[in-house]
């Protein structure tokens, strides 16, 4: 008598404690993608605000938004490129694409628009902070979404 369990729909059994597939978004459709994009915007603006405070720049909300605008354009471009309503919680490769697009386009526009330079120290700090925040938000979304 065969007591084997039937295979899962994907053709393989998954242990209940197995790590979720980080390349696939959760199946639910809801307001979550828009909340995730709002969180990403807040994280980018927070990164810019922290940098402005560190350097003693105090010209209010308009100055903050002008300084953040290149990175917000990069975030929007990366989000659209990866079809964020379907991939808002994907860490790889979609999250990495959003991070690199936010960083690369943000730095390029910052220089092109005359909002500041891109010395190596700034590039490294921006890369690190944006990686931790944007990829960290996606990792947290995966954990929360899998429960």
Image (tube, rainbow, N blue to C red):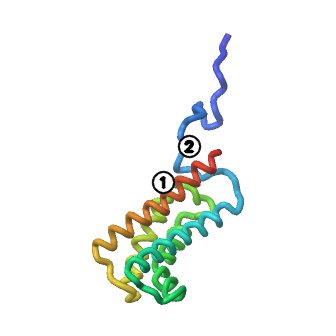
The residue lying toward the viewer, choosing from 109 and 81, is 109
**Tag 1: Cα neighbours inside 10 Å, few (<14), some, or many (≥20)?**
some
**Who comes first in sequence, dot 1 or dot 2?**
2
Numbered badge on residue 32: none
**Which residue is rendered at x = 45% and y = 74% of the image?**
50
User: Could you tell me residue 51's position as x and y percent?
Assistant: 41, 76
Q: Are marks 1 and 2 in contact (CB under 8 Å)?
A: no
Residue in the image at 47% along x and 77% along y: 49
Residue 65 in view, yes or no = yes
Q: Residue at x 46, y 76 (%)?
A: 48
Q: From the viewer's perspective, is residue 36 above or below residue 108?
A: above
Residue 20's disc is 2
Up the image or down, 88 lies above or below 46; here it is above
Q: Could you tell me which secondary element the residue under label 1 belongs to?
A: loop
Is residue 12 visible to the viewer in this orientation of the structure?
A: no
Where is mark 1, residue-wise? 92
The residue lying toward the viewer, choosing from 30 and 54, is 54
Position of the C terminus, as image quadrant, is: top right
Q: In the rendered view of the protein, which quadrant contains the N terminus?
A: top right
Residue 111 place in picture, x, y as percent:
36, 83
Q: Position of residue 136 (x, y in %)?
A: 49, 57
Q: Residue furthest top?
A: 1
Determine whether, in the image, residue 104 is placed left or right of residue 81: left
Instruction: Specify few, some or many for label 2: CA neighbours under 10 Å numbering under 14, 14-19, or 20 or more.
Output: some
Residue that protrudes farthest toward the left in the picture: 120
Q: CA distance from mark 1 to mark 2?
A: 12 Å
Residue drawn at (52%, 53%) of the image: 139
Count of numbered badges drawn on the protein: 2
């Amino acid at each position: 008598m065969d007591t084997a369990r039937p295979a899962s729909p994907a053709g393989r059994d998954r242990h209940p404690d197995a790590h979720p597939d980080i390349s696939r978004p959760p199946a639910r459709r809801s307001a979550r993608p828009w909340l995730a994009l709002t969180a990403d915007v807040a994280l980018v603006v927070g990164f810019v605000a922290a940098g402005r405070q560190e350097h003693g720049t105090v010209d209010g909300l308009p100055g903050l938004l002008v300084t953040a605008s290149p990175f917000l354009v990069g975030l929007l471009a990366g989000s659209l490129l990866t079809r964020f309503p379907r991939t808002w919680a994907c860490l790889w490769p979609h999250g990495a694409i959003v991070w690199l697009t936010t960083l690369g386009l943000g730095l390029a526009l910052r220089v092109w628009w005359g909002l500041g330079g891109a010395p190596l120290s700034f590039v490294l700090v921006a890369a690190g902070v944006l990686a931790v925040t944007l990829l960290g938000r996606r990792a947290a979304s995966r954990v929360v979404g899998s429960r």
